[in-house]
Image: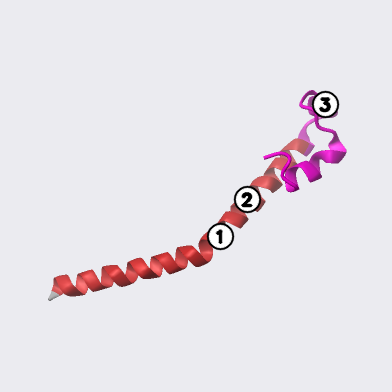
Amino acid sequence: MSSITFDYNTHVFGSLARVFTGAFGGMTHSVRDYLARRDSERRLRALDDRLLADIGINRCDIHDMVWKGSLR
């Protein structure tokens, strides 16, 4: 009897986990992407103009490159 209950609970918890990860998985990916882009922009803005020129980026282009996908 306990194995039937255990199997049932395992199945229910597995289903709940799939629903939870399906509902919040996309949201957590979006949050992680936002934080990574924000960090990238902050780090690029901390570089001096000479280093930015070495990698081919103008200071005025940092925001667009980070947020519009040219730089990842």
The residue where tag 2 is placed is 33
Q: Pinpoint residue 20: horizontal percent, then vertical percent.
A: 46, 67
How far is mark 3 from mark 2, CA to CA?
26 Å
Helix or strand or loop: what does disc 2 sit on? helix
The residue that disc 1 covers is 26
Amino acid of disc 3? Ala
> Is residue 19 shown left or right of residue 36?
left
The Cα atoms of the two marked residues, 2 and 1, are separated by: 10 Å
Label 3 environment density (alpha carbons within 10 Å; few <14, some 14–19, many ≥20): few
- Nearest the eye: 49 or 1: 1
Marks 3 & 2, CB-CB < 8 Å contact: no
Of pointers 2 and 1, the one earlier in the residue sequence: 1
**Magenta span:** 45-72
- The mark nearer the N terminus, 3 or 2, is 2
Q: Is residue 8 left or right of residue 54?
A: left
State the quadrant of the N terminus.
Answer: bottom left
Which is more foreground, mark 3 or mark 1? 1
Q: For the residue marked with disc 2, what is the amino acid?
A: Asp
> Pointer 3 and pointer 1: residues touching (CB < 8 Å)?
no
Residue at image location 67% in from the left, 40% down from the top: 72
| Main SS, magenta residues | helix
What residue is shown at x 84% (from left), y 29% (from top)? 49
Q: Is residue 3 left or right of residue 8?
A: left
Q: Amino acid at mark 1?
A: Gly
